[in-house]
Image: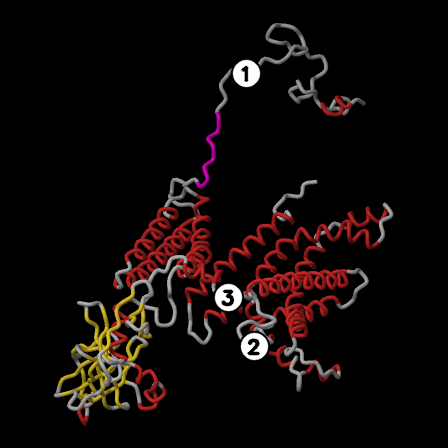
Amino acid sequence: MSTRQTRTGEGRGLPRRGDTGAPRQEGTAPRTSPEGSPGGPPARDRRPRAVPDRPRALAVPPGGWPGGAGAVAARFLALGLIVAVALWAVAPLASAGNWTGTAIVAAVTAAGLYVYLTPRRMPAKYLLPTTLLVLAFQVFPVVHTMSLALTNIGDGHLGSKQEAITAIETSSVRREPGSAEYRLTVAERDGGLAFLLAAGGRAYAGTAEGLRPLEGATLGPGGRITAADGYTVLTSAQASARSAEITELAVPVEGGAIRSQGLSRAYQGRAELTYDAGCDCVTGSGSGSGPEKAWRADEEQGRFVAADGTALPQGWKVDVGLANLAAALTDPRINAHFLGVFGWNLVYATAVVALTAALGIAVALALHHPRMRAVRAYRTLIVLPYAMPAFAMLLVWRDMFNTDFGLVNRVFGLDVDWLGEPFTARLSVLLVQLWLGFPYMFLIATGALQTIPAEYLEAAQVDGATAWQRFRKVTLPLLMLALSPLMVSSFAFNFNNFNGVFLVTAGGPFPADNPTVGATDLLITYTFRLAFGQQGAQYGLASAMSVYVYLIVAVISIVSFRRTRVFQEVDR
């Protein structure tokens, strides 16, 4: 039988391609073509055929929305929830005058209603929430960090210029003879402290924003306020627990501020430092004695600076351009040890990925063997480190490496200062991350092994391949298809593994002549120590260093993805 006969069904009792499919009766005349020739080709039907309508992505039946009344109710309930959340978010933004945030919320809400109130645009229904989540949790943090890197934000430079002036004046308040006194009641409103003040039969409410008359207050024995609408009066025990906050609170008034004297009295003092808008400066002695001094506003530094170069501690946030980014490269405090820290950071991240992947694959192969017994019990025990809180386990490992009473030295009879020497400290953090990280690689490798067809290995064995050759030529390449992207992401995570180093060694050990950089410091811990050290928090500098770390990780990740070709489809 020829191939053509097989395809057309000839020789198997099947009708030919030109037949109608009905068996021809004995004695009947052969079919005649339109031209009258017997057995000729059948006449074509010249009548136009009806073309069915193209199905739409989401056709709406005549009764309305698809899915029934329950689905429609659930859809509109979800949309109502979106609108309610939008109104809840817009209210504080509008009251604070943040019109940019208000416009963003309004635009997002309008886009959501536009997409979900129509039965069409099916792809947008899935892409919209994903896009919003990416913008909120990926794009916005990166852009915000970069914007902070262009400012001097930090301790003493957190607010506006007016807030800095208020802080300077209230912090310099001194009590003078004959100053006004108040009966004080400490209260709370919206989570913040407030002074309920009574003097001369009048009641006032004072906060860090200022003093205002208080209506609806109840005065008790001794003239103190015992209750007020909208305020929660603190008990003596509650006020004592927050005594530090009460002492720091100053209610600004004209020419000074009201401060507490204990928990039951307050006084109005005079500010030793006052702001003069004419010269855009702060004048005064600052200590109640000594000659008058002037601190003029320096808009480039965001602080008030005197002629002798001294500056007031309170400043305000200003744009500094690329100063922080340049300081990260030119400041000797930073760049003197940058290359050393960066080199160890690369070694640390690479070693952790290599060790965890190797151990995870080895254990997965051992438990994947057909003769292995009690596999479920072993897998449960192996996954335990991954299931436990990492920060708690890191602290436990730190104590286990203790020289005097640590479990490691006691069990093995050693006397090794694990965290006190550079080599052993680096070995310690690698061992800890190996114990914490290999269960993740084990889980992925176990799942990937179960997807490898047994026929591949059997064919390799028939061809004479040894066990090592089968692993190297068949098993490992197929495993790497699943592990390669995870190894790249693990590298990025461990490159910035702050907890893995800081909770075990705090970046140490440190040389005796340089307490700023340690043997196990990563770029992230080194940045943390520089930006939040003894000089106070410098969020702008920390953001600038974070931008460099982000660029380094991004470049390494992109190169790794291209080298491993994890996104290339395997079709041969």
Q: Amino acid at mark 2?
A: Asp
User: Going 17% across and 67% down the picture, which residue do you hit?
Assistant: 278
Q: Amino acid at mark 1?
A: Asp
**Which tag is nearer the camera, tag 2 or tag 3?**
2
| Numbered tag placed on residue 334 in the rendering | 3
Which residue in the structure is indicated by mark 2?
Answer: 513
Of marks 2 and 3, which one's residue comes earlier in the chain?
3
Query: Would you say residue 53 sits in the magenta stretch?
Result: yes
Q: Nearer the viewer, mark 3 or mark 1?
A: 3
Q: Nearer the viewer, residue 4 or 518?
A: 518
The answer to which quarter of the image holds residue 93 is bottom left
Q: Is residue 507 left or right of residue 204?
A: right
- Which x, y percent locates residue 47? 50, 17
Secondary structure category for the residue under label 2: loop
Q: Amino acid at mark 3?
A: Ile
Bin the neighbour count of mark 3 within 10 Å (Cα to Cα): few under 14, some 14-19, many 20 and up.
some
- For this orientation, the residue located farthest to the top is 36
Q: Residues within 10 Å of mark 1 (few under 14, many from 20)?
A: few
In this figure, what is the number of numbered marks?
Answer: 3
554 relative position to 122: left or right: right
Q: Please provide the residue range marked out in magenta.
A: 51-58
Q: Kindly indicate the quadrant of the structure image that contains residue 27.
A: top right
- Callout 3 touching callout 1 (CB < 8 Å): no
Q: Quadrant of residue 101?
A: bottom left
Task: Check disc 1 and report the residue beneath it.
Answer: 45
Please state which of the two labelled residues, at mark 1 or mark 2, is closer to the viewer.
Answer: 2
Q: Is residue 406 magenta?
A: no
**Residue name at image x 67 percent, y 80 percent:** 417
Determine whether the residue tagged by mark 1 lies in a helix, strand or loop: loop
